[in-house]
Amino acid sequence: MGWLERVAGLRQWTRSGTRAPHKPLLLLYALGRFQGDAEGGLRYSAVEEDLQRLLAEYGPPNRTTPAYPFHHLVSDGVWEVRTDRGPGSPGSGVRELRETGATGRLAPELRAALRREPQLLGNIARLLLDLHFPPSLHAELCEAVGLELEPAEPQRLSTARRQRDRRMRELVLTAYEYRCAFCGYDGRIGAVPVGLEAAHVRWWAFGGPDEIENGLCLCSLHHKLFDKGVLGVGDDQRILVSQRFVGHSPSAREQVIALAGRPLVGPQPGARTVAAAHRHWHTRQVFHGAPRPATGA
């Protein structure tokens, strides 16, 4: 089994589309550290805060711990852990990992392969990003873990699970008449829409179909906030705004906070609205915290 296949097959807890990006986030973080220091190890007590921040920012809404992937990633053959006593992980308990000086690093065979094949690191990183996160978060996630990726070569990885439908963007933008479903933005340069994107409600990486009832036409700002769990869609097709979002500027109030409780803009008559199953997935797996009350604006 090649390294890409092994990474694509990371064992994760999954049930009904539940997100469990703990191992992918740890592996991305380890790749970023390897890129900067190929010989360095990651002492749990030293990186715990970084890993916890990644899970809070890019993981599911429920609170979790980086101790779980630090221990369990060993079983996937891409990671090793040593303590002050010698090889082997002391378990998945936070106290044990801290007190024993547990230190993780990429498995020796993977480190050797990364040295032999310079392009392998980028291929693994892109595979992890594609399989576990929406495209709108890829660049900032790379920055968060310290990864610098070269432009991808135009090739298809054999481990890709399915092919995206390239018609999705045009179908969704047409259904919403080229307007952001949250704010109504409809900018163009000539006849070409600019700053408008087709957002998956249930992420493609988690079985979300390339269909209108799983899509929203969103401007670039609201697409990013939607994928970060700041914005959502309620059962009544009204906009949810997370109470965890904080912004004091007039722009933050007008472009985000004031959206709470507003109805979606579109879709046009005859087009399918967002399906309940996809809305519920986004609310459970992406949206952070409780929604703000409607502003009355």
Image (tube, rainbow, N blue to C red):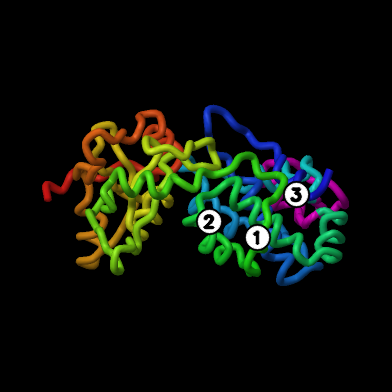
Q: Is residue 245 above or below residue 40?
A: above
Taking depth in this image into account, of 217 and 90 the one nearest to the observer is: 217
Q: Secondary structure at mark 1?
A: loop
| Residue at which label 2 appears | 53
Does residue 79 appear to the left or right of 163 in the view shown?
right
Q: Secondary structure at mark 3?
A: helix
Residue visible at 39% across and 43% down in the picture? 287
Residue 186 position within the rendered picture, expressed as x and y whole percent measured from the top left: 25, 59
Q: Is residue 61 above or below residue 154?
A: above
**Mark before the other along the chain sequence, 1 or 2:** 2
Asked if disc 2 and disc 3 are in contact, CB closer than 8 Å, the reply is no
Residue 21 position within the rendered picture, expressed as x and y whole percent measured from the top left: 59, 45
Q: Could you give the CA–CA distance between mark 2 and mark 3, rounded to whole angstroms?
A: 26 Å
> Dot 3: within a 10 Å radius of its alpha carbon, few (fewer than 14), some, or many (20 or more) residues?
some
Q: Could you give the CA–CA distance between mark 3 and mark 1, rounded to whole angstroms?
A: 17 Å
Residue visible at 29% across and 36% down in the picture? 271
Question: Mark number for residue 4?
Answer: 3
Taking depth in this image into account, of 248 and 83 the one nearest to the observer is: 248
> Dot 1: within a 10 Å radius of its alpha carbon, few (fewer than 14), some, or many (20 or more) residues?
few
| Residue at which label 1 appears | 154
Label count reads 3
**Mark before the other along the chain sequence, 3 or 1:** 3
Residue 13 position within the rendered picture, expressed as x and y whole percent measured from the top left: 62, 33
Instruction: Read off the magenta span.
Output: 80-106
